[in-house]
């Protein structure tokens, strides 16, 4: 009986550990504000410079950043923080005014005139 109980406990532990494992590679999308190809390059570079990000593609029209990342090494929040550091807003994290001000003049996506020009 003791042996059976020990086996049952071990099986439950294995199932529990398996349920907690994160995906090695996950595909996610993040909405990122920007307006041009310079923004695209900057956003993708910031994402790819995050440890664990294997693929990043930002679409200028939809503002969707498609990512493939290793959830064991990074998180959506960490990626959004790195994107905010280069001056771009996400729904999760807004860029500081200082980081936004460092953007090139044509990349000032918060300015309605700039948005209309693109």
Image: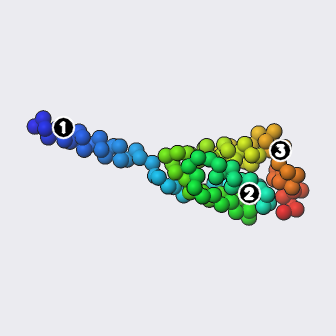
Q: Residue furthest left?
A: 1
The local secondary structure at tag 1 comes to helix
Can residue 64 be seen in this snapshot? no
Label 1 sits on residue: 6
Q: Residue at x 86, y 55 (%)?
A: 106
Q: Could you say which disc has been placed on residue 44 in the image?
A: none
Q: Residues within 10 Å of mark 1 (few under 14, many from 20)?
A: few
The local secondary structure at tag 2 comes to helix
Query: In the displayed structure, would residue 5 be above or below residue 31?
Result: above
Q: Mark 2–mark 1 contact, CB under 8 Å?
A: no
Whole-angstrom CA distance, mark 3 to mark 2, is: 15 Å
Task: Indicate the position of residue 5 as horizontal and vertical percent values.
Answer: 17, 38
Whole-angstrom CA distance, mark 2 to mark 1, is: 56 Å
Q: Mark 1–mark 3 contact, CB under 8 Å?
A: no
The local secondary structure at tag 3 comes to loop
Answer with left or right where residue 44 lies relative to residue 70: right
Q: Residue at x 69, y 53 (%)?
A: 45
Return the residue nearer the eye: 44 or 100. Answer: 44
Task: Indicate the position of residue 29 as horizontal and vertical percent values.
Answer: 61, 57
Q: Nearer the viewer, mark 2 or mark 1?
A: 2
Label 3 sits on residue: 102
Can residue 42 be seen in this snapshot? yes
Asked where in the image residue 113 lies, by quadrant, the reply is: bottom right
Q: Nearer the viewer, mark 1 or mark 3?
A: 3
Label 2 sits on residue: 41
Earlier sequence position, callout 3 versus callout 2: 2
Task: Indicate the position of residue 15 as horizontal and vertical percent values.
Answer: 31, 46
Q: Residue at x 55, y 45 (%)?
A: 74
Quadrant of the drawing holding the N terminus = top left
Return the residue nearer the eye: 19 or 72. Answer: 72
Whole-angstrom CA distance, mark 1 to mark 3, is: 61 Å
């Amino acid at each position: 009986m003791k042996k059976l109980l020990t086996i049952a406990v071990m099986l439950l532990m294995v199932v529990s550990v398996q349920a907690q494992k994160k995906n090695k590679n996950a595909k996610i999308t993040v909405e990122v504000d920007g307006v041009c190809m310079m923004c695209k390059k900057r956003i993708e570079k910031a994402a790819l410079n995050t440890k664990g990000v294997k693929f990043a593609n930002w679409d200028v029209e939809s503002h969707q950043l498609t990512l493939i990342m290793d959830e064991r090494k990074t998180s959506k929040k960490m990626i959004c923080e790195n994107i905010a550091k280069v001056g771009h807003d996400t729904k999760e994290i807004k860029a500081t005014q200082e980081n936004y001000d460092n953007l090139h003049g044509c990349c000032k996506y918060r300015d309605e005139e700039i948005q209309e020009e693109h």
